[in-house]
């Protein structure tokens, strides 16, 4: 090893700027097998070269000589970090869900739905899911998706990862066909859609041109909320089904307030848990700045979700009133402008949300095609999600090892932290632009 003189000593003997004692550099790392001097990281032999280290974007993981014990230590450390991320995110979301579940005690006998699990079973399931997702990210290989449960399909996640890999390489079902959506996503939409199942069923029947089968159930539901309403089977627009005796504008305003309250618990762990994991050191130095950004991001994303859900009901009511009819094309037209609410989100998150929704839409579309016989039954394709995920992770890890400049800096920082790789100077796109 070089003496403690550090980078100054390295510079005096002609080492390149990648080399430093703090990064674990040694004289042996700077000498190749033929005795020639050259940086093992960027493979440069000419110290005077003006090109920066990111010109050779390959990682030096397979170049620097590591002992078996060091390799094992790196594997264990990376696995532990991946486990902490997976368990932290899933556990944080599960904790908020359990707390919400425990607080949900005051509701009428009609509107309270039958719980599938007791509170004890829900906590046990949350612990199992937390451990499974921790192991999933802790191993982070294609077949590791099986760790989330041998019978649990994650096709949408696999498709999302495939699209994310494609980006790196190249750079209305909620209302009409809920059974085509994954149960967890359907539950999420039902919660933030803010409407009881009987209301959604009534709208579905009207939009599809089917005779009403549950008008009495809708009337009973509103009666439990203190609203006495009589629905007309010959109605042309479903506004009275959607918001009872409320006016359309009044309903949008009241719905927005409630939607924002529902959205806050969703985004608090999304922003604060990664801040505690990734920026744990920075929290000691500038806690107000980091926590302030997290709270601002929570407020901003909650505003996006609440505006998105509110505008969906607003636009559908608006079109129903103008054309005085309700059908499937009208529902599609009414939900299309709601995508404008994405402009509220940070620019860096818009693509993420779009890809996430697109993955769900593709899965729902394929499920619909399967139901009408245009695609083979999914039972004939065993764990296609694992195959897709394996291919996707292979592309992502190839880009991480060989094409690091295609990553956004925030993703690169997280992966470097997980795998314990200190990035060389000026490697990320942000550093390049500066």
Image (cartoon, rainbow, N blue to C red):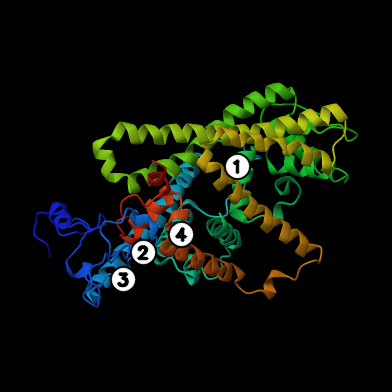
Q: What element carries label 1?
A: helix
Of badges 4 and 3, nearer the viewer stands 3
Depth check, mark 2 against mark 4: the one in front is: 2
| Image quadrant in which you'd find residue 57 | bottom left
In the rendered structure, the answer to whether residue 67 lies left or right of residue 104 reads left
Answer with mark 4 or mark 3, whichever residue precedes in sequence.
3
* Residue 384 image point, x, y percent: 61, 70
Mark 2 to mark 4 CA distance (whole Å): 34 Å
The answer to which of 258 and 170 lies nearer the viewer is 170
- Which quarter of the figure has residue 419? bottom left
- The residue singled out by tag 4 in the image is 129
| Residue 384 appears in the rendering | yes
Name the disc covering residue 59, or none: 2
Residue that label 1 marks: 191
Q: Residues within 10 Å of mark 3 (few under 14, many from 20)?
A: some
Residue 246 in sight from this viewpoint: no
Which of the two discs, 1 and 3, sits closer to the camera?
A: 3
* The C terminus, quarter of image: top left
């Amino acid at each position: 090893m070089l003496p403690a003189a550090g980078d100054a000593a390295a510079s005096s003997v002609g080492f390149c700027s990648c080399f430093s004692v703090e990064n674990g550099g040694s004289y042996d790392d700077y000498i190749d097998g033929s005795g020639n001097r050259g940086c093992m990281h960027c493979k440069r032999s000419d110290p005077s070269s003006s090109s920066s280290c990111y010109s050779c974007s390959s990682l030096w993981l397979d170049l620097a000589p590591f002992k078996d014990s060091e390799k094992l230590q790196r594997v264990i450390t990376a696995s532990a970090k991946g486990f902490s991320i997976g368990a932290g995110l899933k556990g944080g979301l599960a904790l908020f869900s359990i707390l919400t579940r425990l607080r949900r005690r005051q509701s009428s006998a009609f509107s309270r739905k039958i719980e599938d699990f007791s509170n004890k079973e829900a906590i046990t399931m949350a612990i199992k899911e937390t451990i499974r997702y921790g192991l999933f990210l802790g191993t982070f290989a294609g077949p590791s998706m099986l760790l989330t449960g041998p019978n649990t399909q994650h096709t949408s996640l696999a498709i999302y990862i495939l699209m994310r890999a494609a980006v790196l390489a190249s750079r209305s079902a909620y209302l009409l066909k809920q059974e085509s959506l994954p149960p967890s996503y359907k539950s999420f939409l039902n919660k933030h859609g803010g409407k009881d199942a009987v209301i959604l069923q009534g709208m579905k029947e009207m939009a599809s041109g089917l005779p009403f089968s549950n008008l009495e159930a809708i009337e009973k539901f509103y009666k439990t909320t203190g609203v006495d309403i009589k629905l007309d089977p010959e109605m042309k627009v479903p506004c009275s089904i959607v918001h009872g005796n409320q006016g359309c504008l009044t309903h949008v305003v009241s719905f927005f307030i409630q939607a924002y309250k529902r959205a806050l618990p969703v985004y608090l762990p999304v922003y604060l848990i990664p801040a505690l994991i990734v920026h744990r050191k920075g929290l000691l130095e500038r806690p107000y700045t980091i926590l302030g950004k997290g709270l601002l991001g929570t407020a901003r994303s909650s505003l996006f979700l609440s505006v998105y859900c509110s505008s969906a009901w607003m636009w559908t009511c608006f079109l129903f009133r103008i054309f005085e009819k309700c059908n499937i094309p009208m529902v599609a037209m009414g939900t299309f402008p709601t995508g404008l609410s994405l402009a509220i989100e940070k620019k860096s998150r818009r693509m993420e949300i779009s890809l996430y929704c697109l993955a769900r839409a593709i899965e729902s579309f394929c499920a619909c095609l399967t139901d009408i016989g245009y695609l083979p039954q999914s039972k004939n394709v065993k764990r296609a999600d694992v195959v897709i995920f394996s291919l996707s992770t292979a592309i992502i890890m190839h880009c991480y090892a060989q094409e690091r400049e295609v990553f956004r800096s925030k993703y690169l920082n997280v992966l470097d932290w997980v795998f314990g790789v200190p990035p060389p100077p000026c490697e990320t796109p942000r550093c390049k632009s500066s």
